Image (cartoon, rainbow, N blue to C red):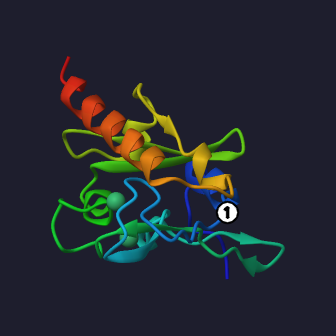
Amino acid sequence: MRTTMPEMFWHLMDGPSIKGATCAVCGRWSPLNDHHVVFRSQGKLFRDGKEVPKPTIRLCGNGNNGTYYCHGKAHHGLLHFDYRDGAWWVLETREPCKVQEAWEMDGWLKLDWLYKEERSIERSADLREAIFERGIDYDG
Ligand SMILES: [Zn+2]
Ligand SMILES: [Zn+2]
């Protein structure tokens, strides 16, 4: 029982799991599925001899039903997550890339509204629009 996860991913393990009533990124109501932010292939982290559970973020889609839904985007290297300053952040890229490459890019959006009691669908729509616009700008 030892840590196989590269150190660059460890900070993600401090993030809380997000189990919202809608997709954490775009606000869709269904289909919803919990995404493991650190992939199985990225290894395991042990602290004090105990395996640290991997945080999950509830997203739309199921991870293998194409890249229309957020979960599919996450599994195709198009939607990336980071955890810093006590919050989850998201970045959508036009081209697939590794999360450690995405971390070097600009345009990350803070999912700070996740932590508020009152989550409005309007807020989700704003965020979806911001991500969409960001995607259009990405080549520039
Ligand atoms: Zn979504
Ligand atoms: Zn997933």
Q: Relative to 81, is 135 on the left or the right?
A: left
**Disc 1, ligand 2: is the CB inside 8 Å?**
no
Percent position of residue 127, x then y: 41, 41
Percent position of residue 69, x then y: 25, 62
Percent position of residue 24, x then y: 47, 59
- Residue of label 1: 16
Residue sitting nearer the eye, 102 or 42: 102
Q: Relative to 125, is 78 on the left or the right?
A: left
Q: Helix, strand or loop at disc 1?
A: loop
Q: Residue at x 68, y 58 (%)?
A: 117
Query: Could you tell me which quadrant the C terminus lies in?
Result: top left
Residue sitting nearer the eye, 74 or 98: 74
Residue sitting nearer the eye, 27 or 53: 27
Q: Which residue of the protein is positioned furthest toward the right in this rendering?
A: 48
Q: Residues within 10 Å of mark 1 (few under 14, many from 20)?
A: some
- Asked if residue 77 is positioned above or below residue 90 in the image, the reply reads below
Query: Could you tell me which quadrant the N terminus lies in?
Result: bottom right
Q: Residue at x 34, y 44 (%)?
A: 128
Q: Residue at x 31, y 59 (%)?
A: 70
Q: Relative to 47, is 110 on the left or the right?
A: left
**Residue 35: quadrant of the picture:** bottom left
Q: How many numbered callouts? A: 1
| Image region (quadrant) for ligand 1 | bottom left
Residue sitting nearer the eye, 42 or 69: 69
Q: Residue at x 38, y 75 (%)?
A: 32
Residue type at numbered disc 1: Pro
